Image: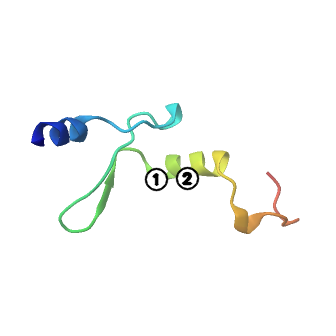
Amino acid sequence: MAKKKDNAKNELPKVHDELAGFDITINSFGEINRTVDINKINEFLNKHMDDKKLRGRDDLEK
């Protein structure tokens, strides 16, 4: 059974093509380590995700 867990650990998660190679971990100090720059992640989220808090605001243009 331990072999299944090890195999699952080595598999990369499925991500969108624009975020290819994305991986995120937390080290022993509680710091977040990621393989993709946070600005690239934010640009992707702004482009593909709807922020329901900003719906209906006239002062924002997309």
Q: Are marks 1 and 2 in contact (CB under 8 Å)?
A: yes
Question: Which quadrant of the figure has residue 28?
Answer: bottom left
Dot 1, crowdedness within 10 Å: few (<14), some or many (≥20)?
few
Dot 2, crowdedness within 10 Å: few (<14), some or many (≥20)?
few
* Disc number for residue 42: 2
Q: Say whether residue 39 is left or right of residue 50.
A: left
Q: Which residue is mark 1?
A: 38
- Residue pictured at 18% horizontal, 42% vertical: 5
Residue 13 position, x and y percent, is 37, 39
- Residue pictured at 39% horizontal, 41% vertical: 22
Q: Regarding mark 2 in the picture, which secondary structure is present there?
A: helix
Residue 28 against residue 45 in the figure, above or below: below
Task: Give, as a three-letter code, the residue at label 1.
Answer: Ile
Residue 62 position, x and y percent, is 79, 51
Count of numbered badges drawn on the protein = 2
> Mark 1 and mark 2: span between their CA atoms?
6 Å
16 or 7: which is nearer to us? 7
Task: Give, as a three-letter code, the residue at label 2.
Answer: Asn
Residue 61 position, x and y percent, is 83, 55
Question: Which quadrant of the figure has residue 36?
Answer: top left
